[in-house]
Image (spheres, helix red, strand yellow):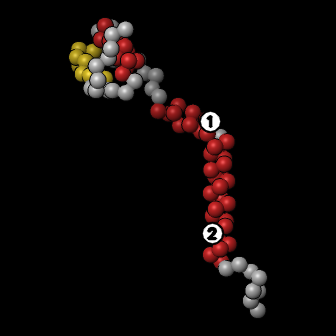
Amino acid sequence: MINKAQKPLYKRLWFRVMVALGLGIALFLAFKVPILQAVSNNLRSEDEPVKTRYLFVLSGGAYDRAHEAARLYKAGLVDTLVCTGENVEKT
């Protein structure tokens, strides 16, 4: 015999999916910093710089990138600097 008080299967499944999604989002937000730090540790490289012919300085945080590029150039590790984007203002 069918119980008329029981919700249809799709409504029960939808509720379970929403609860699981909500818990997943809550856990991600709770542990966001450790998760992102663990991922970013794999993206960083601590290798020693090696001599190269060209160094491309991308725009973005141009001030810091330009100073790092100049440091590498003065150290003799780069033959040619190629800058993209806007000029860096002198300070």
- Closer-to-camera residue (42/69): 69
In the depicted structure, whether residue 83 falls above or below residue 35: above
Return the residue at label 1: 34
* Residue drawn at x 64%, y 62% as measured from the top left: 18
Using the rendered view, name the quadrant where residue 82 is placed: top left
Locate residue 5 relative to residue 49 in the image: left or right. right
Identify the mark at residue 14; answer none if there is no mark. 2
In the depicted structure, whether residue 53 falls above or below residue 31: above
Does any portion of residue 53 appear in the rendered image?
Answer: yes
- Closer-to-camera residue (63/68): 63
Question: Please, which residue is most extreme toward the bottom here?
Answer: 1
In the depicted structure, whether residue 6 falls above or below residue 48: below
Residue 79 screen position, x and y as percent: 23, 14
Neighbourhood count class around disc 1 (C-alpha, 10 Å): few under 14, some 14–19, many 20 upward: few
* Residue drawn at x 27%, y 15% as measured from the top left: 78
* Residue drawn at x 68%, y 72% as measured from the top left: 12
* Disc 2/disc 1 C-alpha distance (Å): 30 Å
Locate residue 77 relative to residue 6 in the image: left or right. left
Q: Earlier in the sequence, mark 2 or mark 1?
A: 2
Q: Amino acid at mark 1?
A: Pro
